[in-house]
Amino acid sequence: MELRRARSLVGYWIDGELVLDNYLDAASETGERNGVAVDGPSVDILEQFDDWTDPETVPDRLDRYDASSVRDAIKALTEAGLLRTRDETTVEDQVMDAWQPWGEPATFFHFGTKDTAYVSVDGAVADAGMAARREEIRAEIAADGPPPAIFARRPDAERIHLTRAFLPLRRDFGEVLVSRRTHRTYKDEPVPLRSLSTVLHYTFAPMYFYDAGMLGNLMLRTSPCGGARHESECYVIVRNVEQIPPGIYHYSPEDHSLEIVSAGVDQRLMDRVLFSQKMITTAGFVCFLTVNLPRAMYKYRSARMLRTVLLNTGHLAQTFALTATAVGLGPAQNDAFSDSEVESMLGIDGISETAVYVLAAGVPDRRTDGFPIEDGHEDLERRVGESLARATGPGR
């Protein structure tokens, strides 16, 4: 029988021990990963199984160790899932081949957070083990003290209070849905102040508040968010907006204001950090969404929550796009930016708060009804209309 080292191993140090985690192995019933602590000789043995190897040949190649101890270690490493038989590697090989284009980080993140057990701090539980884990989580949360503030405050920052004369969102919902398109070019006209104010309010401001007991007071936005943690912050780069000087601002949903981060906009810097994507860099205003990690981590103690916070920013992006469409702006969104440079530009540390998404909007210079007309195809709408007329003519 030949053995091979598992291809889905990651290693890290915990309390002075090297732990190898086979992230394709199922998590425990409580959702914990099943890492195995290994020592130097174990690593030496695993190195011998880079490809299919007869375990009986290994003691001779590791003659600095006692042969019987090497055989015992091989057996233990096999039982721990660090060494695999051919029958055990079918799924492993399929995963590695299928995910190869995205590499180890994406593969580890996806499969390492798969099948995580969700343990609610309230509600019924199925067994004693889950109940015990829930109490552990409640104790951890309580030991951490008061929950993080739901609003990020910059008390010393100068601020511009936005108008609350919001535009009425009376456009037919179905029409807004089918009209939403990603815009890539804009007119050289300022975004109306009321339009900016309306988009920021209905996307990022609280609509209501909720008392969640030990988890603190929570805000409820127009977008769903795991546990109503609402960990996303919005930084607004104003390029061309009525009555608002160009600059970098932090949107404060608490008082519907723009807190000044820095005055002016360095267009060359914007082009560089956004890889010259004109759909973003030429918009009237740009919104960088960041994640305030302590706000999410306070309740959720599992790596699975990283999936959730990324999904949450997607919810916000769709709300942004629909609201911008409803007020007559052209929205766009992208995740291609230089993370570290953007975080430096926004004045955040990139550790406890990190940038994850960029949204933009401007006065559109193309049609806004959602019809996919491009330059050079102006007669497409006419031909489609003629086809519809023939299809619905008399006798049909």
Image (cartoon, rainbow, N blue to C red):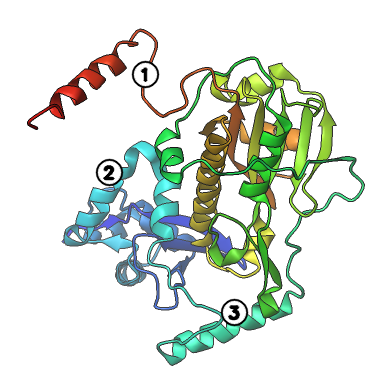
x, y percent for residue 97: 26, 43
Helix, strand, or loop for circle 2?
Answer: helix
Which mark, by number, is residue 137? Answer: 3
At label 1, counting other C-alpha atoms closer than 10 Å, the crowd grade (few under 14, some 14-19, many 20 or more) is few
Visible in this render: residue 64? Answer: no
Element under label 3?
helix
| Residue 283 vertical placement versus 348 (above, below) | above
Q: Specify the farthest residue to the left.
A: 395
The percent coordinates of residue 198 (x first, y second) are 66, 42
Amino acid on which disc 3 is placed: Ile
Question: Nearer the observer, disc 1 or disc 3?
Answer: 1
Residue 289: image quadrant is: top right
Quarter holding residue 191? top right
Quarter holding the C terminus is top left
Real-space Cα separation, disc 1 to disc 2, in angstroms: 36 Å
Question: Distance between the Cα atoms at labels 1 and 3?
Answer: 54 Å
* Closer to viewer: mark 1 or mark 2: 1
Q: Which amino acid does label 1 sit on?
A: Ile
Q: Mark 1 points at which residue?
A: 373
Which numbered disc flags the more N-terminal residue, 1 or 3?
Answer: 3
Q: Mark 2 points at which residue?
A: 98
Measured as percent of width and height from the top left, residue 35 is found at 45, 67
Mark 1 secondary-structure assignment: loop
> Which tag is nearer the camera, tag 3 or tag 2?
3
Callout 2 amino acid: Ala
| Residue 374 position (above or below residue 46) | above
Q: Is residue 275 above or below residue 95?
A: above
**Nearer the observer, 175 or 308:** 175
The answer to whether 247 appears left or right of 299 in the picture is: right
Of residues 60 and 201, the one drawn nearer to the viewer in this rendering: 201
